Amino acid sequence: MKPKNILISVVIPYFKKRKYINSCIKSILNQNHKKIEVIIVYDDENREDLIYLKKIVKRDKRFKIVLNKKNQGVSISRNIGIKKTKGKFIAFLDADDLWEKNKLKFQLNFMIKNKTDITHTNYKVINDENKIIRIMKVEKFLTFKKLLNSCDIGLSTVMISSRIKKLISFKKIKTKEDYILWLNLSKKYQIVGINKFLTKWRKSENSLSSSTIQKITDAYKVYNKYLDYNVIYSAYRTFILSINYTLKLFKQKFIYKNV
């Protein structure tokens, strides 16, 4: 089968992202790979944004909106979306992030050529005004050992073969839910980094991922609860992760300013 005829499933959880969802969907519609299905999991008990969302996607049959009866959170919403996918590859996109127009095509061709099951790419970090504030460049290969020290995978850059669909499950935790998944997958599969900027990841000041205390608390849970490390080693790993995150921020800001 030619790459252009391969179906890619895109999973988007939606919760109060009206300010950004139009731009997000436009970045999908602009993709030069057209064989897609987009599963938007609407996770807001308030249905006010639903009419607006339906208006954006109009009658494009490639878009499917799944309604949660109650707020389930981003992890469960993604899991619900994954179960609905039919594509040979699954891509994740948060409702406030953006893709470059060649994102899906380039990543798909790369994965077919290199026969790999999980890839992620470089990405640019933007603020609420769409200004680039730093960049993130990936390593060619990520192992479990490397991931323990630093989570350098942007969720909206990831594409996974549906061949391992049964292993894709996000844990219900406020942040770091994707980190747990990457750690688990890296035990069995090679995670390949693509040195190309194909995604813009938005850092909003009021988002959960911007809360330092929340991130530290959840990082500890990753090691203690989900990897079953003891209290002391979990605290040590959390400290190392925090230090590496700070160094990574400094490094990426420096690189961006000197590009």
Image (cartoon, rainbow, N blue to C red):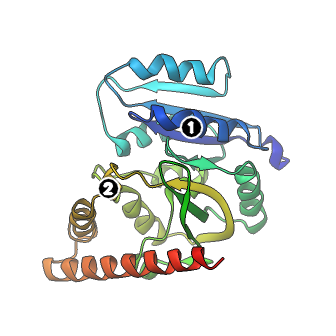
Res. 115 in view: yes
| Residue with the most extreme right position | 2
From the top left corner, tell me how far across and down residue 72 is, in percent.
30, 35
Which of label 2 and label 1 is nearer to you? 2
Q: What amino acid type is highlighted by mark number 2?
A: Thr
Which of 131/227 is in front?
Answer: 131
Q: What amino acid type is highlighted by mark number 1?
A: Thr
Which residue in the protein does label 1 denote?
A: 85
Q: Is residue 216 left or right of residue 180?
A: left
Which of 2/71 is in front?
Answer: 71
Q: Earlier in the sequence, mark 2 or mark 1?
A: 1
Res. 158 in view: no
Classify residue 79 by image quadrant. top left
Measured Cα–Cα span from mark 2 to mark 1: 24 Å
- At 45% from the left and 38% from the top, the residue drawn is 13
Which residue in the protein does label 2 denote?
A: 175
